[in-house]
């Protein structure tokens, strides 16, 4: 026996003696402390599936998805409730509680379903890279994986036997071509057994969640049509059930229309229940705000009508159907492009003399603004004679018209215009090109 073995035996003997000397309470405390000193098992959430690098520590996805157990319990309560459902048009306390719990689980179901689908897509991509790009429906995608599993060679047998009837002919043709290419090139990589088990388990959980969700939707659709037919006809049975699960029909009838658009908003979804109705989703994004206001206004009125009709047992959905049709007609008219308005021509002017003012002031203004004799002479050209032109300071050629060498005499004699001697000399010099008229002569400056 070596020295190390001897020391270990001594330690074990002393530990046994120490344990024998302890009483029951101290021994139990000692055992609890020794257990607490052991490392705890790490509990992961469903969102950790996309971030974990080593999936060897994940034993089961069901342990990471507590929503599945809640959905199973909800399914059992739903089966029990179906047996007790009668012809009463009011929600019982059990039905109200069931609707409230299921409504709170809807957003979580969608988020968990998307996480599981992303996990399956990332891990199964090495087996069949083109599968998700061809089959984009998540339910059809997981059904195909659960049918083929990890043997892509069995795809042709599954198609022949009719197990993949949920696929379209175009998808089957594309998948067949992709399958033949992968088999011929040998590019399909099968993961280890542990990853295969997790992928199939994730597909099974998605299938179970989807079945329970469809079962719940069919139940609430039926109950919503019995409780509030006008509300269900206006926004749809699913949205009506969501509204009734949050609040009762009496409270909904007293709620202002401006507050209805915020019902259903949460940290996960920024859109309310009414925003997800078919009548609002059917219009483009630019018109949804106006459609939401119109629908919210009619939801309050429809709930009041249903509340009054439930007391008199005269339920009918004719008013809700008529209001829905009116809203759709208004929205269609709102979305129409603007009409091409024909531009009307101006009316034919009436040949009438314009009214002119008289008086001394107006007469003085006309005398001050009238055309001078020099301007009148410049605007006329002598017949059969070349017009005399001059170049101004800016290099532009200006025609002088009748202001040539022979027109100065005509201005003063023929027309009888009284010109001063200085003005006559300036006009003569300007016609000869000897000098430019000064700026003091307003008429000559205006001429230039």
Image (cartoon, grey):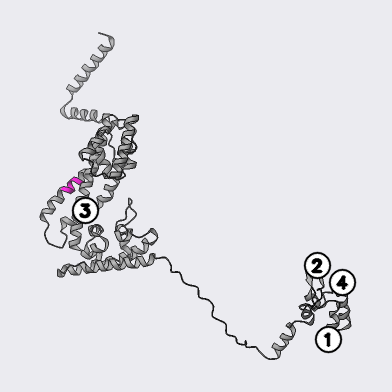
Residue in view at x 38 percent, y 64 percent: 335
Q: Nearer the viewer, residue 12 or 284?
A: 284
In the rendered view, tell whether residue 191 sits above or below residue 73: above
Residue 389: which quarter of the image?
A: bottom right
Q: Nearer the viewer, residue 253 or 385?
A: 385
Tell me which segment is drawn in magenta. Answer: 71-75
Q: Where does the image place residue 253, in percent across and percent down from the top left? A: 25, 66
From the image, which quarter does the C terminus lie in?
bottom right
In the rendered view, tell whether residue 134 sits above or below residue 433: above
Residue where numbered disc 3 is placed: 217
User: Disc 4 vs disc 3: which is toward the camera?
Assistant: 4
Residue where numbered disc 1 is placed: 414
**Seen from this angle, which residue lies furthest front?**
384
From the image, which quarter does the N terminus lie in?
top left
Secondary structure under badge 4? loop
Give the Cα separation between the discs numbered 2 and 3. 92 Å
Q: Which mark sits nearer the N-terminus, 4 or 3?
A: 3
Q: Where does the image place residue 45, in percent across and percent down from the top left? A: 29, 40
């Amino acid at each position: 026996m070596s020295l190390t073995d001897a020391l270990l035996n001594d330690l074990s003997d002393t530990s046994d003696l120490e344990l024998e000397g302890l009483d029951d309470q101290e021994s139990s405390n000692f055992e609890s402390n020794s257990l607490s000193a052991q490392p705890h098992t790490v509990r992961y959430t469903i969102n950790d599936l996309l971030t974990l690098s080593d999936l060897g520590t994940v034993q089961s996805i069901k342990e990471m998805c507590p929503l599945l157990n809640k959905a199973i319990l909800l399914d059992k309560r739903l089966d029990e409730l179906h047996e007790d459902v009668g012809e009463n048009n009011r929600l019982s306390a059990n039905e109200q509680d069931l609707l409230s719990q299921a409504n709170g689980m809807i957003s979580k179901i969608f988020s968990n379903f998307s996480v599981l689908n992303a996990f399956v897509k990332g891990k199964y991509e090495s087996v069949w890279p083109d599968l998700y790009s061809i089959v984009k429906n998540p339910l059809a995608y997981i059904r195909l994986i659960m049918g083929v599993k990890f043997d892509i060679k069995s795809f042709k047998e599954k198609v022949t036997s009719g197990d993949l009837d949920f696929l379209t002919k175009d998808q089957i043709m594309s998948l067949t071509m992709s399958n033949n290419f992968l088999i011929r090139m040998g590019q399909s990589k099968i993961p280890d057994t542990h990853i295969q088990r997790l992928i199939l388990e994730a597909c099974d959980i998605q299938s179970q969640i989807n079945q329970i969700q469809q079962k719940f939707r069919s139940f609430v659709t039926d109950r919503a049509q019995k409780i509030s037919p006008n509300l269900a006809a206006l926004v749809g049975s699913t949205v009506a059930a969501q509204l009734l699960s949050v609040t009762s029909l009496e409270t909904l009838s007293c709620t202002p229309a401006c507050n209805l658009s915020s019902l259903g908003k949460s940290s996960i979804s920024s859109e309310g229940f009414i925003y997800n109705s078919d009548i609002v989703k059917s219009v483009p994004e630019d018109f949804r705000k106006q459609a939401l206001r119109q629908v919210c206004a009619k939801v309050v009125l429809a709930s009041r009508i249903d509340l009054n009709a439930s007391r008199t047992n005269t339920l009918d959905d004719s008013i809700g159907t008529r209001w829905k049709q009116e809203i759709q007609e208004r929205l269609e008219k709102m979305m129409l492009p603007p009409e091409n308005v024909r531009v009307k021509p101006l009316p034919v002017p009436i040949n009438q003399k314009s009214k002119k003012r008289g008086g001394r002031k107006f007469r003085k203004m006309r005398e001050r603004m009238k055309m001078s004799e020099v301007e009148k002479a410049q605007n006329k050209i002598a017949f059969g004679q070349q017009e005399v032109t001059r170049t101004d300071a800016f290099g532009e050629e200006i025609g002088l018209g009748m202001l040539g060498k022979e027109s100065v005499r005509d201005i003063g004699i023929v027309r009888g215009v009284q010109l001063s001697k200085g003005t006559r000399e300036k006009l003569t010099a300007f016609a000869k090109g000897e000098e430019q008229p000064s700026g003091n002569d307003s008429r000559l400056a205006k001429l230039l």
